[in-house]
Image (cartoon, rainbow, N blue to C red):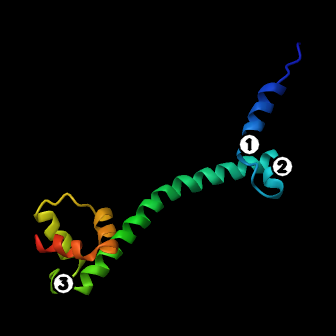
């Protein structure tokens, strides 16, 4: 039987993994098995945290809007949920990200938005 040499293919695969794991410390950047395990763990974490990042930013925007609405509770008829409810009733095109930024940077314009409701 002929001898099968897999050096090129295997080396290419390992080199790809080692370039991914080159910044890790210790055996995680040297041993092939540790590299592949760490790569799988890193990719799983990055996939999970992409969704978590969206969730965290949404919570931040809601907190910012809620803080400004509680400062002037009489103007906003109470708190955050009534303010958002009125936005939906008026079919406003402003989302929470925009409102959170306006609430931090320019409160007067935020108050003007609430007066239109």
Q: Which residue is mark 1?
A: 19
Q: Earlier in the sequence, mark 2 or mark 1?
A: 1
Q: Viewer-nearest of labels 2 and 3? A: 3
Image mark for residue 42: none
- SS label for mark 3: loop
Whether label 3 touches label 1, CB < 8 Å? no
Q: Alpha-carbon neighbours of circle 3 within 10 Å: few (<14), some, or many (≥20)?
A: some
Q: Which residue is mark 3?
A: 78
Q: Earlier in the sequence, mark 3 or mark 1?
A: 1
Instruction: Describe residue 105's horizontal placement relative to residue 84 as left or right.
Output: right
Instruction: Describe residue 6's horizontal placement relative to residue 87 as left or right.
Output: right
Residue for point 20% across, 57% down: 93
Depth check, front residue: 35 or 90: 90
- SS label for mark 1: helix
Label tally: 3
As drawn, the residue found furthest toward the top would be: 1
Question: Mark 2 to mark 3: distance in Å?
Answer: 59 Å
Question: Mark 2 to mark 1: distance in Å?
Answer: 11 Å
Which of the 4 image quarters holds residue 88? bottom left
**What quarter of the picture does the N terminus occupy?**
top right
Residue for point 70% across, 45% down: 20
Q: Alpha-carbon neighbours of circle 2 within 10 Å: few (<14), some, or many (≥20)?
A: some
**What quarter of the picture does the C terminus occupy?**
bottom left
Residue for point 11% across, 64% down: 89
Looking at the image, residue 51 lies above or below residue 61: above
Instruction: Describe residue 46's horizontal placement relative to residue 30 as left or right.
Output: left
Residue for point 52% across, 59% down: 49
Looking at the image, residue 51 lies above or below residue 81: above
Q: Which residue is mark 2?
A: 30
């Amino acid at each position: 039987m002929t001898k099968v040499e897999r050096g090129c293919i295997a080396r290419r695969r390992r080199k790809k993994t080692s370039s991914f794991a080159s910044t890790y410390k210790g055996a995680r950047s040297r041993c092939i098995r540790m590299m592949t395990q760490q790569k799988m763990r890193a990719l799983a974490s990055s996939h999970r945290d992409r969704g978590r990042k969206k969730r965290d930013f949404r919570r931040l925007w809601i907190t910012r809007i809620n803080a400004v609405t509680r400062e002037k509770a009489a103007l906003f008829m109470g708190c955050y949920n009534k303010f958002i409810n009125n936005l939906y009733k008026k079919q406003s095109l402003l989302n929470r990200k925009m409102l959170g930024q306006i609430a931090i940077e320019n409160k007067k314009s935020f108050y003007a938005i609430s007066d239109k409701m």
